[in-house]
């Protein structure tokens, strides 16, 4: 699988020949101003929760591409009211096998409302099993005990964890989260985008390295030739 980091918590995965966009917050993100949201192609859009910094480009990209939106029951219901008909509702603990792999919706400890105030259900993360690998995209979350269960039930190869603090885990808690989920390869997200979540990169790298972990802070680019292969 290939991964492009589109800034904040947005990624474009290429798995089994399908393109999966996660939490698109691109057009309002100054750090991603070189990426054109209206040119992104995708087959699926995974949404962890409904906050503006995760759904800013959801409606326009979903309508333009016809991509299938995968999220909580409540968010898919909201999507239908925005005119997005290709939705797949899930809830915590549920799995579904799509044509690129299996997605399980897992617990995240965070709030969840949509930009117009609509209740979004429970915030979530995703376990994706495909191409013989298991990846964990936590979404916005605090450190929590459920992560131990996630680590026991899955052999996670790569984990996408927030490290920006203030709204989510910060660096030190993310190091503990990596231990809970038993994963050495961490891809940082939800940092630097705005003032509340600016991080010290050197401190972050050292904190993870001191714990024997690999922290990857990816370049923000939609250039497929610069995609990371997992
Ligand atoms: Ni959030
Ligand atoms: Mn967020």
Image: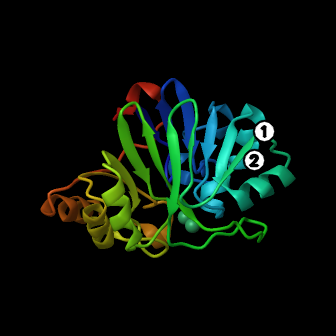
Query: Which numbered disc covers residue 101?
Result: none
At horizontal 23% and vertical 61% (from top left) the residue drawn is 202
Label 2 sits on a secondary structure element that is helix
122 above or below 222? Answer: below
At horizontal 32% and vertical 49% (from top left) the residue drawn is 156
62 above or below 206? Answer: above
Which residue bears the numbered disc 1?
63
At horizontal 75% and vertical 43% (from top left) the residue drawn is 60
- Expressed as whole percent of the image width and height from the top left, the position of residue 138 reads 45, 58
- Expressed as whole percent of the image width and height from the top left, the position of residue 93 reads 53, 59
Query: Which numbered disc covers residue 59?
Result: 2
Q: Nearer the viewer, residue 217 or 95?
A: 95
CA distance for labels 2 and 1 = 6 Å
Q: Label 2: how many residues lie within 10 Å, few (<14), some (14-19) or many (20+)?
A: some
34 above or below 89? Answer: above
- Expressed as whole percent of the image width and height from the top left, the position of residue 147 reads 37, 66
Classify the position of ligand 2 by quadrant: top left, top right, bottom left or bottom right: bottom right
Label 1 sits on a secondary structure element that is helix
Q: Nearer the viewer, residue 25 or 132?
A: 132
Relative horizontal placement of residue 132, taking residue 14 as reference (left or right): left
> Image quarter for residue 87?
top right
- Expressed as whole percent of the image width and height from the top left, the position of residue 96 reads 58, 43
Q: Label 1: how many residues lie within 10 Å, few (<14), some (14-19) or many (20+)?
A: some
């Amino acid at each position: 699988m290939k991964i492009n980091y589109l800034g904040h918590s947005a990624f474009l995965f290429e798995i089994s020949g399908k393109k999966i966009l996660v939490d698109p917050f691109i057009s309002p993100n100054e750090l991603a101003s070189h990426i054109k949201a209206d040119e992104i192609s995708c087959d699926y859009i995974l949404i962890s929760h409904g906050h503006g910094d995760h759904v800013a480009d959801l409606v326009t990209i979903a309508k333009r591409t016809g991509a299938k939106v995968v999220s909580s029951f409540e968010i898919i219901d909201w999507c239908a009211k925005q005119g997005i008909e290709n939705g797949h509702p899930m809830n915590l603990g549920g799995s579904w096998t799509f044509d690129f792999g299996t997605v399980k919706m897992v617990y995240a400890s965070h709030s969840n409302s949509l930009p117009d105030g609509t209740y979004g259900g429970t915030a979530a993360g995703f376990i994706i099993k495909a191409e013989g690998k298991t990846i964990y995209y936590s979404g916005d979350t605090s450190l929590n005990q459920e992560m131990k269960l996630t680590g026991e039930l899955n052999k996670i190869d790569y984990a996408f964890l927030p490290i920006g603090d203030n709204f989510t885990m910060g660096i030190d808690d993310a190091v503990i989260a990596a231990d809970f989920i038993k994963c050495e390869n961490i891809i940082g997200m939800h940092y630097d985008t705005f003032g509340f979540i600016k991080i010290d990169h050197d401190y972050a790298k050292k904190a993870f390295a001191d714990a024997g972990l690999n922290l990857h802070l990816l370049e923000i680019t939609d250039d497929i030739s610069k995609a990371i292969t997992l």
